[in-house]
Every structure is written in C-alpha cells, then in structure tokens.
Amino acid sequence: MRRLSSVDAQFLAMEDGRIHSHVCQLTIIEATTAAGAKVDGRRIRELLADRIDRMPPFRWRVKEVPFGLDYPVLVDDEAFDLDSHIWESALPAPGTDQQLADTLARIVSRPLDRARSLWELHVIHGLADDRIALVTKVHHSIVDGVSGMELLGALLDPTPEPADTPELPAAAPRSLGAAPSDVELLTRAIATLPVQSVRIARSVPTMLRHIDQLPTMRNLPGAGVIARAADRAERIATRNKDGRSLEHPHAAAPKVSFGGRISAQRRFAFGSLPLATIKSIKDTVPGATVNDVVVALCAGALRRRMMARGDDVATPLVAMVPVSVRTGDQDSGNQDYGNQISSMIVPIPTDEPDPLRRLEQAHQVMHAAKDRHRAIPAKLLTAANHTVPPALLARTARVISMTTGAGWIKPPFNVTISNIPGSPHPLYCAGARVVSQHPVNVLLDGVGLSITLLSYQNRLDFGLTADRELLPDVWRLADEMREELAILDAGVGVH
C-alpha cells in the first residue's frame, strides 16, 4: 500500500458534490492512422491494455482509514476491469467544437467512482474534419500537472509506428500489494498518532510565517498580521541570519461576476494560439518569458469579458499560478505520482487598458512573484496541511470552502492560470496524429474560472473550465484570447 500525502488527501477531502477534484485532458486525433486504418474504441482499448503497466496509478484505488485517523492509502484494485473505465460515444452531426465542449462539460461534471481506480477514458467519434476526441479523466489526488502529462504520455508515440513498450522504472512499482484490512489500517493509524503530534509541532512555525501565501488560508481574518509576527519571531530566534525580513504583499481579490458559490455543473471552451507569435511578442520586452505574455493575454481577455458583463475593472484581478516543485530525479522518471506543487498568488493587470503596458506590467508582477516565491518553502502546502490532524482535514477543507462560497470570507484569488510545457514534436496515438491537446482544470468555491494552457508543436492549446452558472459566456472569452493576441501583436509591430 502507499499512503497519500497530505496534499493528495486534501484533493479527496475537498469534494462535496459541487467541487470535483479530477483533472481532464481533451486530446483530438485524426480518425485515420498514417497507414490508412480507422481508429475506433477497440483500437484505443488494445493500446491501453498493452501499456497499462506503464501507468501504475490506473490499477490502484483509494481505501479510507477507519474514522479518518490517518490519510487514505492507495492499494491495488483487486477487481480491476479495464472495460469499466473506457466509454465510447459519438457526437450528432455536424460535430462542432461547441458540441464537443458541451459533451466534455457533462463528463467533467460527474464525480469519479471511489470504489474503483480513479480514472476514465472517453472515446468520442463524429467530430468534424474526420477527427476523434479522447477525454482522459484522472483524480487530482494521484496526479498533478507534470505527473499527469507523463502518465498520459504513455499512450502517445513520437512516430506513427507504435514504439516498443519500455520497462517501468524501478522507482515506480507496478503493484502496491494486497489491501490491508480495516483493523490493520486502524492499528497503523493509532500507532502514528504520536508522530502526527510531532509533525504538527514542526509544521506550525513554517505555516504561520507564510499563511498569507497559502491559497486556502490567505484571506482568513488576521492572516497578514500572523504572518508578519511569525516572521519577526523567526528572525529573532535565528538572530536574523539572512539580515532581512520576508515581503508580505497582499493583493485582495476583487468581487467579480464569475466569483461566488460554484455549482456541480461545468462549461468548457477551447482553442489554440500560435506559439511563434507569442515568442516574437515576448522578445520585445527584455527578460520577458512566454508565460509573461500568456498572463498579459489572459489579463486582456478577462478585462474585455469583465467590461462586457459590467464588472469593475479598476482593481486588478488576482490569479493563482501553480508551480511544480519536483526535483530533477522526479522529472526524469524516479517520481511519486502524487502532487508536488506550490503556487504563486499574483495580481494581474486587468486594470490596465493599454495592451503594451499590460504586457510590461505582467512581466514585472511575474518577475516579482518569482522572487518572492523563492523565499517560500517548496513543501509549504504539505506543512500547512500537517498542522491539521488527518481526522479533521476533510472537515476543515469543507468549512473553508463553505465560508468562501457563502461569501463570509473573500475568495483568495479570482482565477487560476496554468501553463504546462508539452511536446515540441508531433505525437501519435494508436498510429493516428495528435491534432491538439486541451487541459481541463479544477474549480474551487469562489473561483468560477480556470485557464490552462499546454504547448504542443508550434501552438499553445488552451482550455477554459468554468462554472455553468457563473460564466455561461465562456466561449466569448476563448474568442477574446485570440483577439487580444492579434491586438498585442499588431501593437508590438508598430511600436
């Protein structure tokens, strides 16, 4: 068995029927292979069956510890049945992108069955232009953005001819062994209770010093005061070895029409942006990155949508930007499949009307955020969760979600913006060329929109995940992303 980390367990704990903690990816492929064969569900199933050993979490299930005395564990799914995880369907004619997005939204809106391995694969036929969609749906408790890409990458090849299946790295076991009984889990949990107390004591100072940078706690009453006081105490205790105090900036998330209590239903929109254009824009600002341009584009598109919906644009929106904290060994395959993530909380320049100044400001705020983030422990989220006993983790997560969704506490941020590196080379699935890949992310109470981008070949493929009621016009935001890029490109060209 393998015990979930506190961060992994939190993704399970936060689900309440409205918040779904699974991440999805829409992969669009050609319906015909390079050799002229048609791709169907049987062909995809055979590929998955051949490579399932390269995807160990797909054969594991979650088992709860009695009374929640410790974090849940992963065990082998003794009743694993590949066919119970694969779904095949078709769009009605004409098979538009809107129809595909609506179908995907329905898939995303359903929770995964915790009695089984926490994943699904949907094969959707009937897309226009002779294409097929593959929708992978995996619970966030067993993957983050990086490990999820590596896991699903097992189904993709760099050539039309499927490659030989390589051996699984020694650090990634195929099997976790037989599931322990409830009595065994309870006995282990009771034995770890003293360890939990030590873990709490060790984690509290770190958590308090950075509480204003934690996405789930930064807007709790007095968070800023606590962080500054804990920082001063730490510097006194260590005799201020580094000679400076931490910065504690706090940009409050303004009220927006797509904030508030989310529902169980989602909307989705997707598209692509030319990567070459983004890189040429990036080169006009010294030191800027592709991600800075992405933030500027998102800020511009969000400003347009906010103005159209009557939102106040005088105050910048606050974005949560996930950051991977995986080590080199983990990136090279010797990794834990769970979550190794941190985050930056960044005010983005939705209040700036000029596109070029918006780009410059996006570069400045991202550069400053990265500098601040270097002073934050990589395992801050883990440390924060360790201050809450496992038996109270689920209750704490739901209370914070409830108070945020009800408006008693302001949302910690307005939108999630995530940019994931992908393959610069063409990929193939079951011999068919991959056309595009669009990520689908998690929503939290108070945050009705998530923007996720994935680089692939010469494009940035993006996915916009929104609450069905809070942002019904999410397709307009997709159009505005493209319009904003065209305006920014034109402005750079004449600048």
Image (cartoon, rainbow, N blue to C red):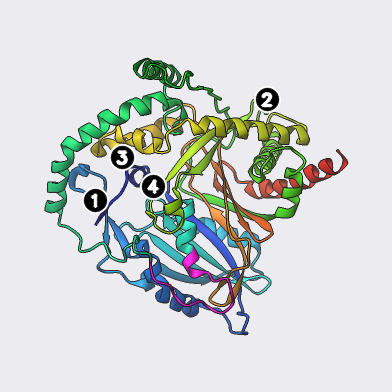
Three-letter amino acid code at disc 1?
A: Glu
Does the magenta segment cover residue 159? yes
Q: Secondary structure at mark 3?
A: helix
How far apart in space, not on screen, are marks 1 and 3 (Cα)?
12 Å
Three-letter amino acid code at disc 4?
A: Gly
Whether residue 109 can be seen here: no
Name the residue tied to disc 2: 314
Residue lying at 24% horizontally and 50% vertically, measured from the top left: 64
* Residue 276 percent across, percent down from the top left: 74, 54
Vertical side of 141 occupied by 369: above or below: above
How far apart in space, not on screen, are marks 4 and 3 (Cα)?
14 Å
Of badges 4 and 2, nearer the viewer stands 2
Tell me where the magenta segment starts and ends, as one range.
153-168
Three-letter amino acid code at disc 2?
A: Ala
Q: Which mark is residue 394?
A: 3
How far apart in space, not on screen, are marks 3 and 2 (Cα)?
37 Å
How far apart in space, not on screen, are marks 4 and 2 (Cα)?
35 Å
* Residue 275 percent across, percent down from the top left: 70, 54
In the image, taking residue 205 as reference, residue 419 lies left or right, namely: right
Q: Are marks 4 and 3 in contact (CB under 8 Å)?
A: no
Of badges 1 and 4, nearer the viewer stands 1
* Label 3 Cα neighbours within 10 Å, binned few <14 / some 14-19 / many ≥20: many
Quarter of the figure with residue 256: top right
* Label 2 Cα neighbours within 10 Å, binned few <14 / some 14-19 / many ≥20: few
* Residue 22 percent across, percent down from the top left: 43, 52
Three-letter amino acid code at disc 3?
A: Ala
Q: Nearer the viewer, residue 51 or 88?
A: 51
Q: Secondary structure at mark 4?
A: loop
Name the residue tied to disc 1: 64
| Mark 1 / mark 4, whichever is N-terminal | 4
Q: Where does the N terminus fall, quadrant-wise?
A: bottom left
Q: Secondary structure at mark 1?
A: loop
